[in-house]
Image (tube, rainbow, N blue to C red):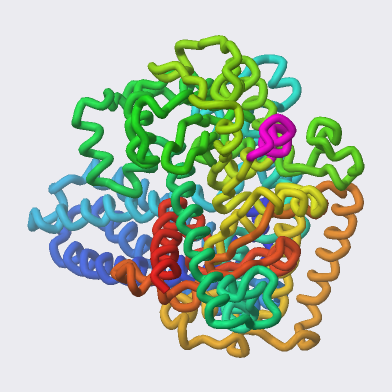
Amino acid sequence: MPALNMFGRSWLVAADDLPVPMMCLMVVHAGWCTVVLFVYERAHQGLESHCPVGNAALTWLFGTFLCFFLCTCLEGLILRHALKGTILQPAKRRHVCTFLYLHFIVTIADISFTILGTFLDYHIGNSCYVRNHVHTAIEVVIVGNYFIIACNFLGVALIFNVFAHLPSEEKWNRLFSFLEMCLCMSKSRERAREKEGSLSHIAICFGEVFQGADLVPSDIAAGLVLLALQHRRILESETLGCSAEEGENSGEKGHVDESKHISVELGNLLEEGAHYARWALASYGWMLYTWANPRGGLAMAFSGEGPCTCCTWHTQQIFRGEHRPTENLDKAALMTCAGIRAEDLYYVSFTNGIGEQPYFIARDVARRAIVLSVRGTMSVQDCITDSMYKPVLLNANAIEMPHLSGPQLHCHAGVVTATNFILSDLDRHGILSTIFFGDTIKTHESALSKSAPDHLEGSEDEHKNWTLVLCGHSLGAGIATVLALHLRKVFQNIRVWGIEPPGGLLSAELAAACREWMVSITHGCDIITRLSGPCLLKLRRDLVDALVRCKVNKFSLLTRMTCVPDSVEESDLLLEPGCEAHEATLLRRDFEQFHIKQINERPLMAAPLYPPGRLLHLRRISPVNKEMSAASIRDTYEVRWISAQELMFQGLLVNETFFTDHFPDKVVAVLSELAQKYQRR
């Protein structure tokens, strides 16, 4: 930090990113100098005495050697100066640009000598050399020069910032527009004018978060490494909530029988959670089923369940949500994962667009429940829906909460859009009304499964014993929650299982109102359940603060954390608060001023939102490895009841598993093993 500024534009690297490239170039150039000297000596001995053009060739070889020697010296100087100072002390590396300009001049000279050598070799050939192998060696030098020059230009191209002259948000918008063009994601004229139906939502999200500090990608990586070191201490010392073995309202310890009763109840709760986590996993279809069970997924693909014609599945069709060739495979995987029969599957919607989420409705006979499972994030369109994170207001009358108003009705905008799509689809086909009340429905052959839904048999009193269960993972869990807020006025016996729902979903009041009928499960340091606008802003501030307090250069930091991460202590890399260098504190002050200004201009970025319902945290108490047995997994985790407020106050925790903790198959496995652990007590 800051970004390297040369030729009137900023680049994608900073001066302290250059040690590794310079060391590589020094090795290559030093080795090539040796080769050129060897060829020069052979050419000098094998040159015909009467050949004046051969002397020019020797001059060319010496000039080539001199260029590579000067490049090696300059690279050593750049390396020395790039290692000076800490990450936020760019003034100590101010001479790097001067040496880079000199290196550029020498490189241009090297290119000129290489072109000259090509011209001379074309005219001389073997005529001036006594031995043929001398001419071959010279040709090797020419080809090697071109290769090294090409590698230099490739390196420059990789760090070239095409949109350096644009503001942050416009820069991200151009980048994602280019990506959209590569993916052939067309949009209508109306949507183009409104910047909807495209990747511009994600571009705006990135533009808002990644601005305010002149950080390059490696600065962000270094900041995350420092945060992981800090968060390691937090994970070891700070424990949220109370143990689920003591009951949700812990405080006083009961008798042994009461403790055993709580353990059995907890086991049953975890078993039910694992059951509906599998239903949430089923909504992803064949692709994720194959990820979780490769052998079963591949066997299904070749067993005639449905054609797997992925090569004909064009990107444009994916984006528009048109008919997919893998629908039969998805239905087969869905039924296998959820453990249901074909006659239990009432409805499947594969429509997928921005704010249009796939879902299915099926009968869970064993638990006397009708289950509506919503798919989570799996496509580009879903990512766009996720990026619409700024809250909008729910209709208080529609969710029967007229006592709430203003920010108390805040909800994730993308989730609201997707919820409205499913509500309109349910209303159009009347599936739930038919199942529970026997009303006439409108069939739609492209969306319905082969068997039409039957009215539940029995008297009206028996119907009340059937439960409407809504479940989903990630984005699907958020949509299931808001769906339940709208449907509970019609279906009184309702329950929701949210498997790792978005953290920035509902206002505190709405999240608390869901506690009566919803349980949310979060696994380890899962990034999504902790993700919201305020948490992102907090992570950004913490990242800048960590860079300010860093007392080593970027190369030393990344080397130590890569080679010996377990032996590095926080005090080895970070200064105590208040001991930072003056230059770094000035940069932090400028960032703080921008941060306050941004929140004042865009208050919805910092609107507090929370995950819904009662929160069950599967806390990891020791590291997990791939070879760990099921019995070991049971001893690796503890189950805790936590509040949404303390989870979001703690914010995002960076560690090596904070992304993979979100995978639904991992949650299913952990829930299943923990359920067995507590049921056996």
Q: Quadrant of residue 212?
A: bottom right
Where's residue 392, x and y in %? 80, 38
Whether residue 301 is visible here, answered yes or no, is yes
Q: Is residue 262 magenta?
A: no
Residue 187 versus residue 71 in the image, above or below: above
In the image, residue 650 sits, relative to residue 52, either above or below, namely below
The front one of 413 and 7 is 413
Q: Is residue 370 placed above or below 144 in the rendered structure?
A: above
- Foreground residue, 252 or 671? 252
Horizontally, residue 112 falls left or right of residue 539, namely left
Identify the residue shown where x is 86% and y is 53%. Answer: 599
Visible in this render: residue 155?
no
Residue at (64, 50) in percent of width and height: 518
Q: Residue 601 placed where, x, y %?
A: 90, 48
Residue occupying image coordinates x 64% and y 43%: 478
**Quarter of the rendering occupied by the N terminus:** bottom right
Instruction: Find the magenta span and give its range.
Output: 482-493
Which quarter of the rendering shows the C terminus?
A: bottom left
Q: Within the magenta stretch, is there residue 488?
A: yes
Residue at 60% from the left image edge and 15% from the top image edge:
439
Instruction: Give the image location of residue 100, x and y in percent.
Output: 57, 63
Residue 517 versus residue 392: which sits nearer the camera? 517
Q: Could you say which is closer to the camera, residue 444 or residue 226? A: 444
Q: Position of residue 53 (x, y in %)?
A: 26, 51
Total of numbered circles in the picture? 0
